[in-house]
Amino acid sequence: MQQTETLTVDKASVTCDGGGGPLGHPRVTLSLADGRNTCPYCSRSFVLRAGAKTGHGH
């Protein structure tokens, strides 16, 4: 079984497309309001870096 990738990010909203190319998937935007989220298509996990802002502003 292939282990999924975990990415640490600085924004509370991320976009995942599975890496693009022929192995990609439809682009989805994921909220990290709780500090973590997993892509429903490719199971890639996104974790909000400690200290990163989670506000709704730009």
Image (spheres, rainbow, N blue to C red):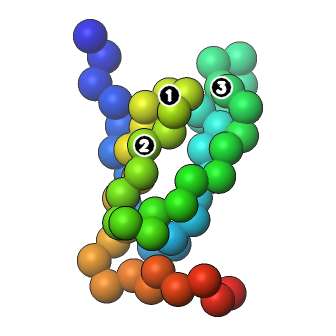
Of 39 and 19, the residue lying toward us: 39
For the view shown, which residue lies furthest in the front direction? 34
Residue 47, image x and y in percent?
35, 59
Is disc 1 surrounded by few (<14), some (14 to 19) or many (20+) residues within 10 Å? some
> In the image, what residue type sits under mark 1?
Cys
Could you tell whether 13 is left or right of 21 in the image?
left
Q: Residue furthest top?
A: 1
Q: Position of residue 57 (x, y in %)?
A: 64, 89
**Tag 3 residue:** 24
Q: Secondary structure at mark 1?
A: loop
Residue 38: image tag: 2
Q: Who comes first in sequence, dot 3 or dot 2? A: 3
The quarter of the picture where the C terminus appears is bottom right
Quick one: SS at disc 3?
loop
Type of the residue with mark 3: Gly
Q: Residues within 10 Å of mark 2 (few under 14, many from 20)?
A: some
How much space separates mark 1 and mark 2, taking CA atoms?
8 Å
Disc 1 to disc 3, how far (Cα)? 8 Å
Q: Quadrant of residue 22?
A: top right
Q: Which residue is mark 1?
A: 42
Rendered view: 57 above or below 24: below
SS class, disc 2: strand
Residue under the point 31% across and 16% down: 2
Taking 32 as reference, is 22 above or below it? above
Residue at left offset 59%, top offset 32%: 18
- At horizontal 60% and vertical 34% (from top left) the residue drawn is 19
Identify the residue at image location x=36%, y=57%.
Answer: 36
Are the residues flagged by discs 1 and 3 in contact, CB closer than 8 Å?
Answer: no
Mark 3 burial class by Cα count in 10 Å: few <14, some 14-19, many 20+: few
Judge depth for marks 3 and 2 and give the one in front: 2
Judge depth for marks 1 and 3 and give the one in front: 1
